[in-house]
Image (cartoon, rainbow, N blue to C red):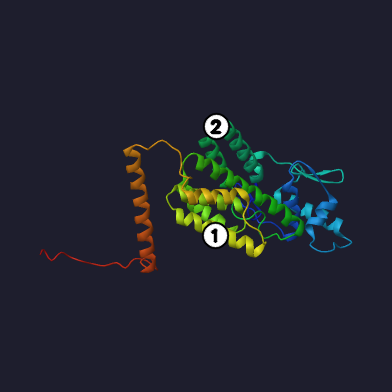
């Protein structure tokens, strides 16, 4: 049985996704999943379950939720959700919970990067990031759970930014531009991805675009918070203006240049034809069958 909190709360069995009971039951389960192996006191379960003042019967209702969850999860012997002193404890392995798998891959990625194996670090952290299916605990909406979910989303962003740092160090600036642009759009006041995007664009020969990213960040911070970008971002901006921020790497071989040019041309043609097909509605509802014959002229 697999439990997923890095996105909407889901439980998967060998037969597929398991339908869960109502919102209160899901909040109880989510609270247990966020601290696997640890005893969650009844007071915290009550706090996570009700957005406003809990009813006088809150303790009994949480107990009923746990009983219903055990039935739905097939935990007849109470080995999954264990009653332990003042509360309950969820017993799962690292491989059963995506949150634990994420933390395991991120830790291994940082270990690899710490010893200089950046490519291995990138591969591990990309594996971790693929576990995410959207905002953590998306849709549950509890005030307490929302705070925990926000911290998980912050861990996701931090992992992504570490990955980008390593890829930039490997010279993979073109590979990260599109992803960084999406993150910057979703986080218009977060300085670190703005700086990474500026660096990637400048190293890709797009100085004007890099300067435009800085200007957008500067205006956004001034309008929303009344502050300027931090010293590191301003220093990067100055280096870009002076043209001092080009990557210091060995010159690639002619074969590398040819391969890169071929990949970029293939990607550009694919984007162009995809856009053209969409504009002309060539695939909606489906291609029109035509008959033809040669005129032999």
In percent of the image, x 45 and y 38: which residue is there?
Answer: 248
Numbered mark located on residue 116 in the image: 2
The residue furthest left is: 297
Which type of secondary structure does the marked residue at label 2 adopt? Answer: loop
Q: Quadrant of the N terminus?
A: top right
Assess disc 2: are there few (<14), some (14-19) or many (≥20) residues with their C-alpha within 10 Å of its C-alpha: few
Q: Give the x, y percent position of residue 93.
A: 68, 39
Residue 36 percent location from the top left of the image: 73, 43
Whether residue 4 is visible: no
The answer to whether mark 1 and mark 2 are in CB contact below 8 A is no
Q: Quadrant of residue 268?
A: bottom left
Q: Is residue 228 visible?
A: yes
Numbered badge on residue 291: none
- Picture quarter containing residue 55? bottom right
- Residue, far right: 56
Comparing 257 with 271, the one in front is 257
| Label tally | 2
**Residue pictured at 62% horizontal, 49% vertical:** 231
Q: Between 121 and 51, which is closer to the camera in this rendering? A: 121
Locate residue 115 relative to residue 49 in the image: left or right.
Answer: left
For marks 1 and 2 on the same chain, the one whose residue lies earlier in the sequence: 2
The image shows residue 41 at horizontal and vertical percentages of 84, 48
The residue pinned by badge 1 equals: 215
Q: Position of residue 106 (x, y in %)?
A: 61, 40
């Amino acid at each position: 049985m697999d439990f997923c909190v890095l996105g909407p709360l889901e439980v998967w069995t060998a037969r597929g996704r398991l339908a869960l009971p109502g919102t209160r039951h899901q909040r109880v389960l989510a609270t247990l999943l966020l601290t696997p192996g640890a005893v969650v006191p009844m007071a915290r379960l009550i706090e996570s379950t009700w957005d406003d003042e809990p009813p006088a019967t809150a303790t009994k209702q949480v107990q009923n939720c746990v009983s219903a969850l055990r039935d739905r999860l097939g935990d007849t012997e109470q080995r999954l959700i264990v009653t332990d002193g003042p509360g309950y404890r969820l017993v799962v392995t690292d491989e059963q919970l995506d949150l634990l798998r994420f933390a395991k891959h991120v830790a291994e990625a940082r270990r690899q990067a710490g010893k200089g194996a950046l490519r291995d670090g990138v591969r591990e952290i990309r594996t971790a990031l693929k576990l995410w299916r959207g905002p953590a605990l998306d849709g549950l909406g509890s005030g307490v759970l929302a705070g925990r979910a926000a911290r998980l989303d912050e861990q996701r962003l931090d992992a992504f930014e570490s990955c980008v740092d390593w890829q930039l160090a490997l010279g993979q600036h073109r590979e990260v531009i599109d992803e960084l642009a999406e993150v910057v759009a979703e986080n218009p006041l977060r300085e670190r991805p703005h700086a990474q995007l500026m660096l990637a664009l400048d190293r890709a020969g797009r100085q004007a675009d890099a300067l435009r990213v800085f200007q957008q960040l500067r205006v956004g911070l001034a309008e929303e918070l009344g502050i300027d970008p931090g010293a590191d971002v301003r220093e990067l901006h100055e280096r870009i203006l002076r043209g001092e921020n080009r990557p210091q790497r060995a010159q690639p071989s002619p074969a590398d240049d040819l391969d890169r040019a071929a990949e970029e041309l293939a990607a550009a043609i694919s984007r162009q034809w995809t856009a053209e097909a969409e504009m002309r509605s060539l695939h909606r509802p489906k291609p029109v069958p035509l008959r033809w014959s040669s005129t032999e002229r």
